[in-house]
Image: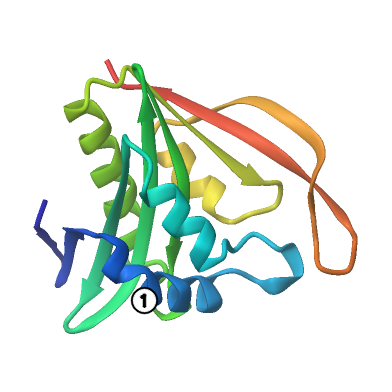
Amino acid sequence: MSTILNQSELREGGVHDLPHVAGIMRDAFDPRFGEAWTSAQCMGMLSLPGVWLVIASLGEQDMGFALARIAADEAELLLLATRPSARRRGMGGALLRAVIEEARARHATRIHLEVRSGNDAVELYRREGFAKVGERRDYYRGKAGQLFDAHTYARDLN
């Protein structure tokens, strides 16, 4: 899975990429919202069947990643992040499309994701054909104890 898009390269990642993933999450996720996963959580997820990691790099530096899984014919985007310096350059869209392509290759017919209300990434998901299908009130708890809704989006892959 090596694709060149506007000087960025997408490749399949693995456990050896987790230090880079942790660095990207530190840069990408605002700590107020408590959305970043720990390296142990990522490693635990990667050890499960049906889980894959896509890394986006620019030159020699890893700039983004997407973590996804499939169960039966349903895929789920678990995490997608890009460093702030790589935003609005098409890297997030390239990662999302790579996850969708891999989900199709793994015979998924639908893909889901969950995002905190107010997250700017919603624009990207809508552009890529995702529609809101649900909401969980007060699902995320920020570092200061404040609560945020989770919105669930889905897209058919047929």
The percent position of residue 57, horizontal first and vertical second, equals: 23, 72
Look at mark 1 in the image and give the residue it sits on. Answer: 20
Q: Residue at x 57, y 61 (%)?
A: 37
Is residue 104 at least partly visible in the picture? yes
> Can you say whether 105 is above or below 88 in the image?
above
The residue under the point 39% across, 76% down is 19
Residue situated furthest right in the rendering = 145
Under circle 1, the secondary element is: helix
Residue at figure coordinates x 53%, y 57% from the top left: 41
* 23 or 6: nearer the viewer: 23
Here the colouring is rainbow
Q: Quadrant of residue 6?
A: bottom left
Expressed as whole percent of the image width and height from the top left, the position of residue 55 reads: 27, 63
Instruction: Between residue 103 and residue 38, name the one nearer to us.
Output: 38
Left or right side of 98 for 21? right
Q: How many marks?
A: 1
**x%, y% of residue 64?**
35, 67
**Along the line of sight, the residue nearer the viewer: 23 or 96:** 23
Quadrant where the C terminus sits is top left
The answer to whether 9 is drawn above or below residue 136 in the figure is below
- Image spot of residue 72 (x, y percent): 35, 17
Please name the amino acid that badge 1 sits on: His
Q: Residues within 10 Å of mark 1 (few under 14, many from 20)?
A: some
- Extreme residue in the bottom direction: 60
Whether residue 80 is visible to the viewer of this picture, yes or no, is no
